[in-house]
Image (cartoon, rainbow, N blue to C red):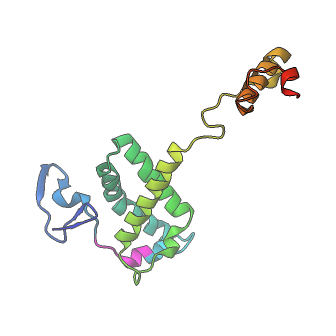
Amino acid sequence: MREYMGLAQVEDNYVESGVPGVSAGSFSFQTTRWTVVLAAKADGSDKANHALAQLCSCYWYPLYSFVRRRGFNAHDAEDLTQEFFYRLLDRHYLNAVDYRKGRFRTFLLVALERFMAKEWRRSRALKRGGDFVFQPMEEQSAEERYAVARKNLRPKLRPRHAGKGAAETAD
């Protein structure tokens, strides 16, 4: 068994984990069948759709496990994994896959890590307006608007003029 990016990779020998239907290597990726990956890159044909379904079923659980080990709860991990596969297929990222460039599982893990980083940044980004509460002008009377405007202008006055009336500052 080898350790790669936090994933246990078991080649051919699966050891029973004690949980029915789950082997010790269930977190690991299966050996990539490049014929299936290449067939999945072709758009629209029945063969491509079958290959895509096969790839998704083979790689969904290892990627889900990867997300769970990053500390996400089960619901969020499912959502992230599903969204990752949606974007992977919708944006045709499989077209960038080439067996000469490296392992398919490495491609998936790097793409998933980048996807998770973007989602993290997006979830923590301040929305337009940030922490400010906006009030429509129609709801404020003229005197309220004047008080707000005066309050906003006061810090901009130079210290020697602060507190003086208009007649005193006009020297």
* Residue drawn where x is 38% and y is 41% of the image: 75
Q: Quadrant of residue 54?
A: bottom left
In the drawing, does residue 62 fall left or right of residue 161?
Answer: left
The verdict on residue 121 being magenta is no
Please say if 124 is above or below 24.
above
Query: Can you see residue 44?
Result: yes
Q: Quadrant of residue 12?
A: bottom left
Query: Can you see residue 54?
Result: no
Observer-nearest of 40 and 135: 135
Query: Which residue reaches farthest front?
Result: 171
User: What count of labels does the image hold?
Assistant: 0
Residue 64: image location, x then y, percent? 34, 53
* Residue drawn where x is 28% and y is 64% of the image: 5
Residue 118: image location, x then y, percent? 50, 54
Quadrant holding the N terminus: bottom left
Q: What range of the chain is rendered magenta?
A: 31-37
In the drawing, does residue 119 fall left or right of residue 143?
Answer: left
The verdict on residue 33 being magenta is yes
Residue 101: image location, x then y, percent? 41, 81
In the drawing, does residue 158 fall left or right of residue 47?
Answer: right
In the drawing, does residue 134 fall left or right of residue 62?
Answer: right
Please say if 23 is above or below 106.
above
Please say if 54 is above or below 158.
below
Quadrant holding the C terminus: top right
Q: Quadrant of residue 98?
A: bottom left
Residue 162: image location, x then y, percent? 73, 25
* Residue drawn where x is 73% and y is 33% of the image: 158
